[in-house]
Image (cartoon, grey):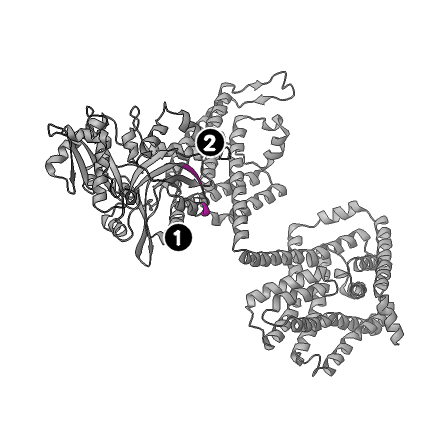
């Protein structure tokens, strides 16, 4: 006996191959004979005869037939929970049970797949070996119900249906019926050892589950035949079903595929049913009892797996799928709008290109020309809104799409078209969480794109009007031609075009409206609190000028950071580093990005430090170096008096005086205003990056003035406070007829004053484009800036500014311009220049540039 057992173990693989080979040969031979004796045309006609109600009924019955198998999982989770597993949510259990049984039903491989899935779903918090042991024991009961049915069928054939066509199988069925009681004896006899986890109630439930599984399969099979109109009684069919199922299970092929089908077709043919009908019956049974539940199980399994993967990968897969769905949705809406306008312009669009022949069946088309153009342009308008992820655009777009879909489907009832439209609506629904912005703000890039698109479409329709009612062709296009609509139809479309322009204007007004406005107004108390507690930045003093908006970042109700910014198009241009707690830069910047993004804006930072630009790079910003700021370190000039230099002391000897005021006298202000107006020479004040002459702003800083030998004020310079150790200069203005040395005279005297007050550093302002793109390995944009720096003296004295500063500068600190990764540097730079708003004819002076930070 031991020798035989050892021989079987040694050649087990070979024996399995031989066994499956024999089965495969038998099935293939029978399939060949069946296919040879039937008409596929008849099969196809039989399938087409089934109406939608019949197919829908089969669909429902097939799903219901799987339900009894869930009892296996009820027993499994009950035993595992009693053994110490944490209680499982019953909704989660139902999903797991359905997934397991529908997949195992079609692709079970002798229950191996079911064991694996149940172990995965129900093994939480327990030893894997123990879970596998329990679930493997449950798998033993899966053929018990079939055994009971075989036993009942054998008795029926022995004593009641002795004339049945399959009576010769009665003893084989009786032998199969012995499995159920033998299994019960085994389980009951080992109830204190191997099967100690199984109580009598649970054993009964497992037998009931198995019986329900096979009775469910038989019921589905019989009802499918009844719905097809097959005229066979239950008593004639069910013995053959039990026999074929038993043979199919012996082959261990998933679902008994092949063996069961061949045996049923042969058996049904023996009962007088033609093979074509038998094939369709088996096919529907396979589809509605095995395939469709299997598909639902796979979908649920993939959904659960994707949820787990999504959690594991920190929500990245869901975000990625939403973004893909959003891109498809935007493309679909643009496609629908453009195709509707083209269809209204060219009546024979399908003749122009094979591409249009493929695309046209999936486009919307209304009978009315006015409506065609109106809906088309509205779709393009909403496409811009959904591309910018504006919440207000989502539901109107869905309503418009459904309107177009219903109209098209009502006129063209195509299954393919309906499926495509349903997929599009599903994609729209999947992308719904991408819509979070409260308002729409036009970027220059979007404006250029929409301008070109609408302009081309308008021109195209105008050309159609010129050629209305004509057919235009050339020799080169001998097989293709353009047919334009008649004059009446074109004029009807023109009305739609005018209506479209009005509707687009209303639409954009609707999309741009929002109760929330970007930033808040000036609050001197909050701003001064941050300045006094954390100190300022080289640009913080400019934020006191009117025209800025402010964003405060708070923690626990306390202000930590403030950003001052001005807007241009869809950009919020922030000047300098954040003002406030330097330890909160990253949190504050991210909060500001989210806040601005929600309102449709992007951030850009001008003249920021190296430390801050690296932080912005980690947050997804691109940046370019725009120059360097010079710094004078007073600790290196302890005994120097800057104003004693020979060339500037001459002005003192000639009677020029420098007077420093911590509070500006009333009588002086009018003279300073006169000097400022003369200096501006009719030009407007610059904005954003420098100060301006405004009484409220002037009074926030100390000021130095220069008087000539006649005691007349001829120039002034304002101090720009930064913190207790650092300061800079702000406005530097003078009369037109003063000596050339006067601007530097004012600056050097103010430097002496700041040094006497105990300041350690004074900022000399920025040298634009200095030390930018100096090597051949630099970025192309920076290399171009370097060429402008070297050879652009006709535009601006870049090198002269750098040389002027060098004699006072002890070290240089780089300054950068940072913009978000999906922004254009060209557009961002142009918007910044327009924001600064320099005069048309008045370039910035060297003296003025020297006091910019």
What is the magenta range? 617-625
The tag on residue 751 is none
**Residue 691 placement, left or right of 76:** left
* Mark 1 vs mark 2: in front: 2
Circle 2 crowding by C-alpha within 10 Å: few under 14, some 14–19, many from 20: some
Q: Name the quadrant containing residue 262.
A: bottom right
Q: Is residue 209 magenta?
A: no
Name the residue nearer the viewer: 150 or 717.
717
Q: Which residue is labeled 2 in the image?
A: 783
The image quadrant where one finds the N terminus is bottom right
Q: Is residue 672 above or below residue 536?
A: above
Q: Is residue 192 above or below residue 76?
A: below
Residue 310 picture location, percent across and down: 55, 56
Q: Which residue is labeled 1 in the image?
A: 587
Residue 367 picture location, percent across and down: 52, 32
Q: Name the quadrant containing residue 820.
A: top left
Name the residue nearer the viewer: 615 or 824.
615
Q: Is residue 196 above or below residue 73?
A: below
**Residue 84 placement, left or right of 232:** left
Q: Earlier in the sequence, mark 1 or mark 2?
A: 1
Single out the residue that lies furthest toward the front: 639
Question: Circle 1 — which element?
Answer: helix
């Amino acid at each position: 006996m031991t020798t035989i057992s050892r021989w079987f173990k040694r050649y087990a693989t070979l024996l399995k191959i031989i066994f499956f080979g024999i089965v495969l040969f038998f099935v293939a031979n029978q399939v060949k004979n069946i296919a040879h004796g039937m008409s596929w045309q008849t099969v196809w006609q039989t399938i087409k005869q089934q109406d939608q109600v019949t197919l829908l009924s089969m669909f429902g019955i097939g799903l219901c037939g799987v339900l009894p198998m869930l009892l296996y999982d009820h027993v499994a989770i009950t035993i595992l929970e009693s053994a110490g597993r944490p209680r499982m949510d019953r909704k989660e259990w139902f999903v797991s049970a359905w997934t397991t049984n529908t997949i195992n039903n079609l692709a079970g491989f002798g229950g191996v797949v079911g064991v694996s899935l149940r172990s995965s779903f129900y093994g939480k918090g327990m030893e894997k070996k123990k879970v596998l042991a329990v679930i493997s024991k449950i798998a033993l009961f899966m053929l018990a119900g079939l055994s009971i049915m075989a036993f009942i069928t054998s008795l029926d054939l022995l004593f009641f249906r002795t004339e049945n066509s399959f009576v010769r199988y009665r003893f084989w069925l009786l032998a199969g019926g012995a499995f159920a009681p033998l299994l019960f004896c085994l389980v009951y006899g080992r109830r204190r050892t191997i099967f100690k986890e199984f109580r009598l109630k649970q054993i009964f439930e497992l037998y009931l589950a198995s019986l329900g599984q096979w009775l469910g399969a038989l019921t589905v099979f019989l009802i499918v035949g009844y719905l097809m109109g097959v005229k066979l009684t239950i008593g004639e069919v069910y013995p053959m079903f039990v026999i074929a199922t038993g043979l199919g299970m012996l082959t261990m092929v998933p679902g008994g595929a092949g063996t069961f089908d061949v045996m049923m077709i042969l058996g049904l043919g023996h009962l007088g049913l033609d093979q074509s009908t038998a094939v369709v019956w088996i096919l529907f049974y396979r589809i509605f009892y095995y395939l469709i539940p299997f598909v639902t199980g796979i979908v649920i399994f993939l959904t659960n797996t994707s949820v787990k993967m999504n959690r594991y990968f920190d929500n990245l897969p869901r975000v990625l799928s939403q973004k893909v769905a959003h891109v498809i949705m935007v493309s679909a809406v643009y496609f629908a709008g453009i195709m509707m306008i083209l269809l209204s312009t060219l009546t024979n669009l399908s003749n122009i290109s094979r591409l249009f022949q493929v695309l046209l069946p999936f486009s919307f088309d209304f009978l009315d020309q006015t409506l065609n153009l109106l809906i088309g342009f509205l779709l393009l308008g909403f496409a811009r809104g959904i591309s910018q992820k504006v919440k207000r655009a989502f539901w109107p777009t869905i309503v418009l799409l459904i309107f177009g879909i219903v109209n098209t489907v009502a006129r063209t009832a195509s299954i393919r078209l309906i499926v495509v439209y349903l997929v599009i609506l599903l994609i729209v629904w999947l992308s719904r969480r991408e819509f979070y912005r409260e308002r729409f703000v036009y970027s220059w890039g979007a404006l250029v794109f929409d301008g070109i698109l609408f302009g081309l479409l308008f021109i195209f329709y105008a050309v159609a009007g010129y050629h209305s009612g004509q057919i235009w062709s050339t020799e080169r296009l001998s097989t293709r031609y353009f047919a334009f609509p008649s004059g009446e139809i074109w004029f009807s479309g023109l009305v739609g075009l005018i209506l479209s322009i009005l509707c687009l204007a209303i639409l954009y007004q609707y999309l741009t409206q929002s109760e929330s406005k970007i930033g808040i107004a000036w609050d001197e108390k909050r701003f001064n609190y941050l300045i006094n507690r954390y100190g300022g930045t080289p640009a913080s003093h400019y934020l006191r000028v009117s025209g800025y908006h402010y964003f405060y970042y708070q923690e626990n109700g306390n202000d930590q950071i403030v950003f001052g910014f001005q807007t241009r198009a869809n950009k919020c241009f922030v000047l300098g580093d954040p003002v406030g707690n330097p330890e909160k830069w990253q949190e504050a910047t991210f909060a500001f990005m989210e806040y601005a993004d929600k309102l449709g804006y992007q951030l850009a930072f001008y003249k920021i430090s190296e430390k801050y630009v690296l932080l912005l790079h980690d947050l997804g910003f691109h940046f370019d170096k725009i120059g360097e700021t010079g710094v004078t370190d007073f600790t290196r000039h302890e005994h120097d008096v800057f104003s004693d230099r020979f060339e500037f002391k001459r002005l003192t000897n000639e009677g020029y005086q420098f007077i420093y005021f911590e509070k500006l006298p009333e009588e002086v202000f009018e003279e300073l205003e006169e000097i400022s107006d003369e200096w501006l020479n009719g030009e407007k004040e610059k904005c954003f990056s420098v100060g301006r002459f405004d009484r409220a702003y002037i009074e926030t800083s100390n000021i130095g003035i220069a008087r000539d030998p006649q005691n007349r004020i001829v120039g002034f310079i304002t101090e720009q406070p930064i913190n207790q150790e650092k300061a800079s200069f702000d406005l530097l203005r003078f009369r037109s007829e003063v000596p050339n040395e006067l601007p530097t005279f004012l600056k050097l005297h103010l430097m002496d004053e700041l040094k006497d007050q105990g300041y350690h550093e004074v900022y000399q302002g920025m040298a634009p484009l200095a030390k930018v793109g100096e090597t051949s390995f630099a970025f192309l944009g920076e290399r171009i800036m370097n060429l402008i720096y070297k050879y652009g003296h006709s535009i601006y004295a870049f090198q002269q500014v750098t040389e002027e500063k060098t004699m006072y500068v002890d070290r240089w600190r780089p300054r950068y311009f940072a913009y978000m990764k999906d922004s254009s540097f060209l557009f961002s730079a142009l918007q910044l220049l327009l924001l600064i708003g320099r005069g048309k004819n008045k370039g910035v002076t060297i003296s003025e540039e020297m006091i910019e930070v």
